[in-house]
Amino acid sequence: MLVAFILFLVIVGSIVFHFWTPWWWTEVASNWGNIDDTIILTFWVTGAVFVAVCLFMSYCVWRFRYKEDRRADYEPESPRLEWFLTILTTIGVCALLAPGLIVWNKYVTVPEDAVDIEVMGQQWYWNYRLPGPDGKLGLTDLRNITEDNPFGMNLDDPNGLDDILIEADDLHILLGQSVKVNLRSIDVLHDFYVPQFRAKMDMVPGTVTYYWFTPTRTGDFEILCMEYCGTGHYAMKGRVLVDNEEDYKEWLSEQINFEEYMASLNKTELIQLALNNKETD
């Protein structure tokens, strides 16, 4: 009887803690509030199962408690119970998966007006690349990465000359502008995550992953790496700032593009090669 009562208290305590917990999500700052809705639905489904199973356990502990004059009945199978559990489990799995698949489809279906940006992760900091006035990101290649070309820019692609390069600094984005985040890693697995945006994705060396979002309020938000990437993983943080149009333009005017970066390194011959390619195109 005592064990059954303790199990019942565990159920009540779990439910109370869920609703009164001091730990909850940060305020959402993008268009992905429906991810919260999907997680809450998961809480309801799994919570209902948790309560049902624990109540059943409490009932069994109480109902079939030890008595000297009681004998156990051996029942190896119950087709009726198996069918009931199979149907109930199927409904529960569908309730968990269906909304997630719908949200995931939206998550990777990028709108046409989205602006491409690139996030490059490496042990243990973030680099960013934004398109210049032409609105296009130039091609890159891991084999091109050197001390003088940390982004691996392809000099045969003239579209990269006006790309804005941001090394180990804050990323700024424009309020209300949809952004496609192109993710690549140059060493190990990383994961680009901004909690307030409800947006995250693994970064796999040798490939480009992506997702999109639209920031819905200005602010200063922390970037975290959510994939263990080595001894400095804990320190792989950054900041993304959502600006209004005036502040964003002011910040953008202070950045340098790839052409200016190469000029600062006295790589005039490489710049001329890229310019010739651009004229040829």
Image (cartoon, rainbow, N blue to C red):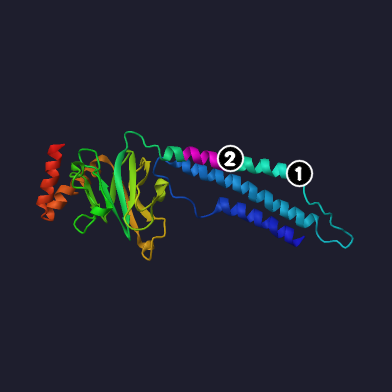
- Where 171 sits versus 279, above or below? below
Q: Position of residue 271 (x, y in %)?
A: 12, 48
Label 1 Cα crowd, 10 Å radius (few <14 / some 14-19 / many 20+): few
Which residue appears at 75% of the width and 62% of the height? 2
Q: Residue furthest top?
A: 112
Would you name the residue on which mark 2 appears? 94
Rounded to the nearest angstrom, the CA distance separating label 1 from label 2 is 22 Å
At mark 2, the secondary structure is helix
Q: Position of residue 238 (x, y in %)?
A: 32, 55
In magenta, the rendered stretch is 95-103
Which residue type does callout 2 highlight? Cys
Q: Position of residue 212 (x, y in %)?
A: 37, 41
Which residue appears at 36% of the width and 64% of the height? 232
Q: How many marks?
A: 2
- Where 13 sits versus 98, above or below? below
Chief SS of the magenta region: helix
157 or 190: nearer the eye? 157
Label 2 Cα crowd, 10 Å radius (few <14 / some 14-19 / many 20+): few
Which residue type does callout 1 highlight? Pro
- Where 3 sits versus 171, above or below? below
Task: Using the rendered view, name the quadrant where residue 182 is placed.
Answer: top left
Would you name the residue on which mark 1 appears? 79
273 or 255: nearer the eye? 273
Q: Is residue 107 magenta?
A: no
Residue 53 lies left or right of residue 115; in this view the side is: right
Whether tag 1 and tag 2 are in contact, CB under 8 A, the answer is no
Which residue appears at 85% of the width and 61% of the height? 67
Q: Quadrant of the C terminus?
A: top left
Q: Position of residue 37 (x, y in %)?
A: 50, 42
Nearer the observer: mark 1 or 2; the answer is 1
Q: Earlier in the sequence, mark 1 or mark 2?
A: 1
